[in-house]
Amino acid sequence: MLKLLILQLIISIAYATSDLKDKWGTLWQFQGIATFAHLDHFQCLVEPDQDFDIGIIGVPFDTAVSYRPGARFGPRAIRDASQRQYSLRGYNHRANFNPYKSWAKINDCGDIPVSPMDNKLAFKQMDLAFDELLSRNSVVDSNLPPRLIALGGDHSVLLPHIRALYKVYGPLNILHFDAHLDTWKPDKYPSYWRTDQSDLSHGSMLWQANEEGLTTKKNVHVGIRTKLSSLEDYEDDDSQNWVRIESDDIWLKGPQYVIDKILNTIPKDTPTYISVDIDVLDPGNAPGTGTQESSGLLPRELIHLLRSIDDLTIVGADIVEVAPAYDISEITALNAAQVVFELLTSMVKKGKVDKDLVNKEVKVFN
Ligand SMILES: [Mn+2]
């Protein structure tokens, strides 16, 4: 009799819980706590049992900027602006694919708790955090690490991410969407005062990556229209193995020229990192950023380019330099959230990474 009562009690509690879920468990898109695209949220750095295939990781760091700061608030702004993305309405009509309803377990991994006080410490934290996250096993294949899409943060957060990726895959091709080169030698900055740490900025991290041998000889800039000291800046960029596609090329030579140039430079089956500085867009479409340059790409052009190169082997990616204090009506953050959607679509649609690409000699994961 007692057993029966206990059973009835359990059933009634279970029923009440499911009743509550039916009544209150479904939120509209503008409700609830904002994770990226309403994905499940785990603080991945401290929850090693929560495996994932692709993680959205915030990197709220902006003390390596040379002009307007504020990108530390980028991850929050991008998450807020992503709220109309969710699995039920996640079908990407340009790709004929829904990345949220496929094989990949995609988590919002929260933020790396980066110091805003000490850049040397911050880079140490970011190096260790990316190493830790890439030391995990993906869900789809325990021989493969997960992949990350980082929400910046200023552009220097690319460096710890590709340092960690290098340990897994070896040298990476970099596909870099930006108004600026970001390959500047530290001595190109107008200051007498220099330290090792001041040499590492959001305009020099690709120079540093080349110094450390993290990149291949097949790297492409798209959207360049930066202010130059002279053509010597381009010679320095050439010597670091970059192909430059100017912002004006998208309308003077057309999108197909840009797509062909990217795909003729970067082999599709080798590990590639895609970095999108939101200032690649025209300031009219991305006012919320630190270092604006007039006459940039339209969002539709950037989205078309990203869709047209989705056969590349993307092992990691970022969207950086969203600084919401300068934004208007979430224009910049909305475009950044769309970039993440396009990158996610490409990564999931292409399938898991070929395990032969994992560098056995230097792999760090178990
Ligand atoms: Mn940049």
Image (cartoon, rainbow, N blue to C red):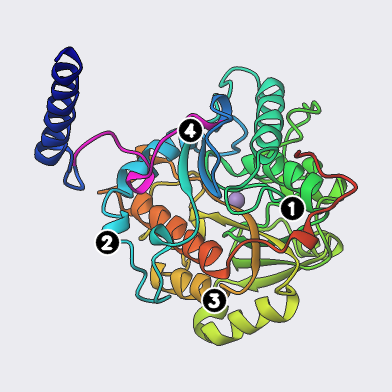
> Would you say 290 lies left or right of 284 here?
right
Q: For marks 1 and 2, give the one nearer the viewer.
A: 2
Q: Give amino acid for label 1.
A: Thr
| Residue 364 in view | yes
- The amino acid pointed to by label 3 is Asp
Tell me the residue at 81%/28% (across/down).
Answer: 196
**Which numbered dot is residue 89?**
2
Residue 191 in magenta stretch: no
Please give the label number shown on residue 360. none
- Name the residue located 35 percent from the left edge and 49 percent from the top edge: 37
Q: Circle 4 is placed at which residue position?
A: 72
The N terminus - image quarter: top left
Mark earlier in primary sequence (3, 4): 4
| Residue 283, visible in the rendered structure | no
| Secondary structure state at the residue bearing disc 1 | loop
Q: Quadrant of residue 85?
A: bottom left
Which of marks 2 and 4 precedes in the sequence?
4
Residue for badge 1? 183
- Segment colored magenta: 31-44
In front: mark 3 or mark 4?
4
Q: Which residue is mark 3?
A: 248
Residue drawn at x 36%, y 39% as measured from the top left: 35
> Element type at marker 3?
loop
Distance between mark 1 and mark 2 Cα atoms: 39 Å
- Counting residues from the start of the chain, the first of labels 1 and 2 encountered is 2
Disc nearer the start of the sequence (1/3): 1
Q: CA distance from mark 4 to mark 2?
A: 29 Å
